[in-house]
């Protein structure tokens, strides 16, 4: 009986799910949303072990820590539903997975800063928005959601 249990246990371990990051940088967060503090960053072609699926969110292990990523954030967005300009913008910002709020939540990438500098554009406004976001992100955000007004704790 014991050898069969060992065999089945080995099969379960061998079948663990793994995903590959296909964007330049992927932020892994402590909760399901961009307001939760990061627990790590994964780079392109890095593999992450999936420990649990929760809808379109994946609970993953990175550097020995648990964190969450949205499954769609693993790869760049295709042309479907995006104009050519939006797709071009995604390519200019390091191939991030989208050009919406979650892309903004990641902050400025080196590629985006380089592009802005080359075009004589100021990043001051975006940098101020990042500072504002960081003032309410992390533990303050988690405490706010526990009050039940927004986020995963909302009734």
Image: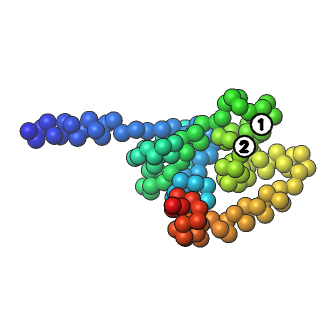
Residue toward you, 54 or 27: 54
Per the image, the residue denoted by label 2 is: 99
Q: Is 125 on the left-hand or right-hand side of 147?
A: right
Horizontal arrangement in the rendering, residue 94 relative to residue 58 (left or right): right
The answer, for residue 85, to whether it is visible in the render is yes
Badge 2 density bin: few <14, some 14–19, many ≥20, Cα 10 Å: some
**Residue drawn at x 73%, y 49% as measured from the top left:** 110
Which of the labelled discs sits on residue 86, or is there none? 1
Quadrant (top left/top right/bottom left/bottom right) for the N terminus: top left
Residue that protrudes farthest toward the front in the picture: 155
Question: Residue 138 appears at what percent x and percent y?
Answer: 58, 66
Say which element carries label 1: helix
> Quick check: can you spot residue 44?
no
Find the distance from the CA under tag 1 to the CA under tag 2: 7 Å
Residue 96, x across and y down, in percent: 67, 42
Please give the name of the residue rendered at 24% of the width and 38% of the height, measured from the top-left corner. 10
- Residue at image location 40% in from the left, 38% down from the top: 17
39, above or below 111, in the image:
below
Q: Position of residue 98 (x, y in %)?
A: 68, 41
Which quadrant holds residue 80? top right
**Tag 1 and tag 2, C-beta contact below 8 Å:** yes
Q: Quadrant of residue 150?
A: bottom right
């Amino acid at each position: 009986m014991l050898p069969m249990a060992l065999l089945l246990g080995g099969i379960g371990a061998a079948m663990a799910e793994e995903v590959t990051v296909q964007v330049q940088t992927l932020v892994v967060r402590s909760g399901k949303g961009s307001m939760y503090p990061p627990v790590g960053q994964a780079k392109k072609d890095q593999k992450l072990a999936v420990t649990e699926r929760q809808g379109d969110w994946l609970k993953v292990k990175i550097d020995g820590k648990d964190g969450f990523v949205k499954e769609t954030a693993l790869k760049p967005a295709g042309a479907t539903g995006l104009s050519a300009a939006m797709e071009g913008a995604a390519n200019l910002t390091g191939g991030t997975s989208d050009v919406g709020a979650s892309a903004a939540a990641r902050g400025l990438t080196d590629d985006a800063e380089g592009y802005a500098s080359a075009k004589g554009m100021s990043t001051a406004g975006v940098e101020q928005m990042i500072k504002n976001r960081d003032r309410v992100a992390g533990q303050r955000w988690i405490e706010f959601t526990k009050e039940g007004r927004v986020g995963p704790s909302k009734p």
